[in-house]
Image (cartoon, helix red, strand yellow):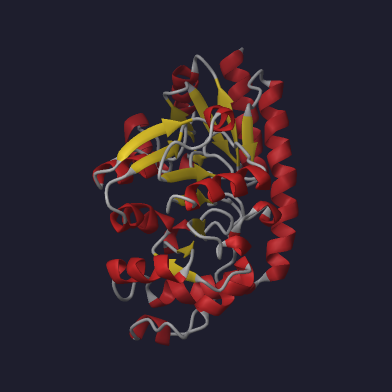
Amino acid sequence: MLQHGGRLRRAAVQQGIALQRWLDLSTGLNPHAWPVPALDPHCWARLPEDDDGLEAAAAAYYGCDSLLPVAGSQAAIQALPRLRAPCRVQVMSPGYQEHQQAWCLAGHEVQPVSARELRESPPASDVLVLIHPGNPCGERFSADELFGWQQQLAARGGWLVLDEAFIDATPETSLATYVGLPGLIVLRSVGKFFGLAGIRVGFVLAQPEILQPLRELLGPWALSGPARAVATQALGDRVWQETMRLQLAQQSNRLAALLQRHHLTPAGGCALFQWVPAADAAHLHAELAQRAILTREFDVPASLRFGLPPDETGWARLDAALKEIHA
């Protein structure tokens, strides 16, 4: 299995530092999670039901009623390749590596492709998988670019798969409302923006002819009753969402400025993280870990992804640690 951010317990054991002392900046999750209220006890005792309001709340939030709840977008990432016969697939690189692995394991011919290469020549595949905004690099694509690639792929019965896990802070850049277009598949996550990764809730937005076989493949009760109840309420809380979008934009700018002060100028990012290419990324990652600060390290290219600190104490700790390391 591939490695991901958030493996805090392993880092605590490796460094011999108690878990509660760590500042975890490795996941790119909103550290100011939506406040989960007490839940109706019935959601724990009954099997989940599809008419509990989750789909309606998601349709209103995404502006699209052709959608399927899944156990985090990861469930869709693993299942979608099984809906097609072996074909040519281009997957955005660098990017979330689960995409490439899932298509490879399903027997497809997979080619990594950079944003620059895509802009220089049209997709040479039957399926194009993009992360938008990019993870970890924060790449953005214009609507014209995305629609152009969608049309080229659809003309040969292909798919454009957009992983929009980090787009909630800028919903105006999403293609969620356009999933009626042939071959357009949009993946959304409740974990990142809402800070609720533990409930494992995501959505696939696509045409019904794609969603129906996916539903059958995943089987009944893909989400637990408590997860459905929490997601329904979070998706409907518009006041919290609007307030949080402003807050995250400010904090992302603050993080970029802090890193730049320590000669770690971000080359990309979004509302929830900043990405810093650095030849000494492995050394910096280790130095921060020795100070109980966990970041997400990438080998190719050598780089670190920094998530948002959760409070003023966290901001001060990161600032002091970088100052000490560079001294």
The answer to whether residue 189 is above or below residue 291 is below
Tell me the residue at 49%/64% (across/down).
206
Tell me the residue at 66%/34% (across/down).
316
- Residue 82 picture location, percent across and down: 28, 55
Residue 233 visible within the image = no
- Residue 127 picture location, percent across and down: 42, 46
- Residue 230 picture location, percent across and down: 51, 72
Tell me the residue at 59%/66% (across/down).
35
Tell me the residue at 59%/55% (across/down).
193
- Residue 208 picture location, percent across and down: 45, 71
Q: Quadrant of residue 37?
A: bottom right
Is 268 on the left-hand or right-hand side of 20?
right
The answer to whether residue 155 is above or below residue 220 is above
Quadrant that contains the N terminus: top left
Q: Quadrant of residue 317?
A: top right
In the foreground, 198 or 190: 190
The answer to whether residue 49 is above or below residue 259 is below
In the foreground, 225 or 53: 53
Number of marks drawn? 0
The answer to whether residue 122 is above or below residue 248 is above
Quadrant that contains the C terminus: top right
Is 207 on the left-hand or right-hand side of 80?
right
User: Residue lying farthest front?
Assistant: 155
Residue 223 visible within the image = yes
